[in-house]
Amino acid sequence: MSGEKAALQGLRVIELGNLIGAPFCGTLMAEFGAEVIKIEDPKVGDAGRYTGEVVDETSLYFVFLARNKKCITLDLRVPQGQEIFKRLVPLVDVVVENFRPGTLKKWKIDYPELSRINPRLILSHVSGFGQYGPYKERAAFDRIATAFAGQDYITGFPDKPPAHPGGSVADYLTGLFCTVGVMFAIYLRDLNKGQGQEIDLALYEGMFRVMNQVEEYDQLGVIPMRTGNTNPQFVPAETFLTKDGQWIAFHAGTDSIWKRFMKLMGREDLGDDPKFSIQRNRNQNREELHAIIADWVKNFEIKPLLELLWDAGIPSTKINNIADIFKDPHVQARKNIIETKLPSGRKIKTMGIVPKLSVTPGRVEFVAPPLGAYNEEVYRGLLQLSAEEYVDLKKQGVI
């Protein structure tokens, strides 16, 4: 990072694996100043390079996954590649990986071996079902993780099959939890003068952690069911169609906001009706209530309706598509979309940095380096290989 000091300046990370679970952790750390060295197979590279649409020979999917990362190639399947990796390990703080459990051991670079070389090393594993347990050998992607965690079971409408939530929610949640785990481990290591550790994340676990179903099932046997767009705990909190054919979402489910909303509607009688006066009763009568609100909403076009709701302090928004988001002044003001350049020089919009730190903000320095773009810097510079050794490794296909 150039300019002011970055939050993770001085932290060096090796990223192994493909696509999202572990690589998103690497992306977040790279955005805040960590030197992230991404190791890819010399022949094919990360699967993200071949996912989604391509512009100027660059996958637009890979743009946001590989930004700020020093991409190098190394064949970890061969002994020479494993030895090169072991020479890198003393120079780094963290390794994140998302291979199948047992892969690193097969390659003779598992944690017992790596921690012998570098006792300060933190190794974070991301896998479908974790490093132990009866399902540890099973493969998984985001769709499998959300289904196993129970998220699909409650997503969709009661009369339709379970639905997979849009996007790769489990993948990105896992990346977030991976980053949190790494930060915890770094703090403990540095506070206690030197001890590294392993981190173990199953792809379904982040999704399961945020669902909050365990206590009610344990105590009351409650199995949540699909309820469409409604929230069983807060009513009304729904999606409605406006006069001009736009979808609007608002939340007036707490008792205090509910009273303000009824005043706005001019329906204080509903606010006093025992069927709707308290949160629990509104839930029991939500279909009747939502029908009344839907009839009211369809009399308004979306812009004046939103102004009314905002003025009354009712949390609400138009349901945006990506074109709406690009034009939104709040998104622009908070720099949620920023501009950078592809390796070709073409300007491209990409997602902004989250979270926003006041003293050490993150940034995007570059995106989607070509396969092996940083080989010479890492191998000849950081690792100080001789020119002869470097050329020989390239000829043999090790790098």
Image (cartoon, grey):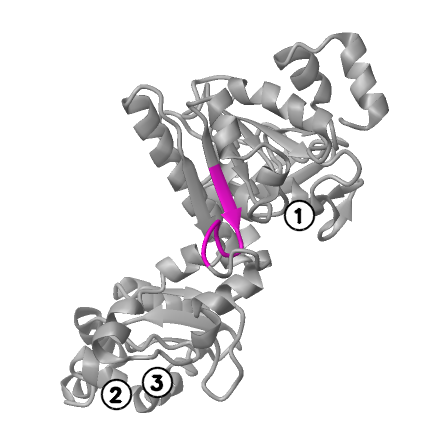
Q: In which quarter of the image is residue 75?
A: top right
Dot 1 amino acid type: Tyr
Which residue, given by chain and number where applicable, does mark 1 sit on? 61
Camera-side mark, 3 or 1: 1
Residue shown at 50% from the left, 43% from the top: 125
* Contact? badges 2 and 3 (CB < 8 Å): no
Q: Is residue 38 above or below residue 200?
A: above
Look at mark 2 in the image and give the residue it sits on: 284
Q: Is residue 64 above or below residue 299?
A: above
Marks 1 and 3: in contact by CB < 8 Å? no
Label 1: state its secondary structure.
helix
What kind of element bears circle 2?
A: helix
- In the picture, which quadrant includes the C terminus? top right
Query: At label 2, which amino acid type do we have?
Result: Gln
Give whichever of discs 3 and 1 has the lower sequence position.
1
Q: Quadrant of residue 285?
A: bottom left
Q: Badge 3, how many Cα within 10 Å: few under 14, some, many 20+?
A: some
Q: Residue 23: percent from the left, percent from the top?
A: 56, 41
Q: Is residue 354 left or right of residue 138?
A: left
> Residues in magenta?
124-133
Q: In this figure, which residue is indicated by the disc labeled 3?
A: 290
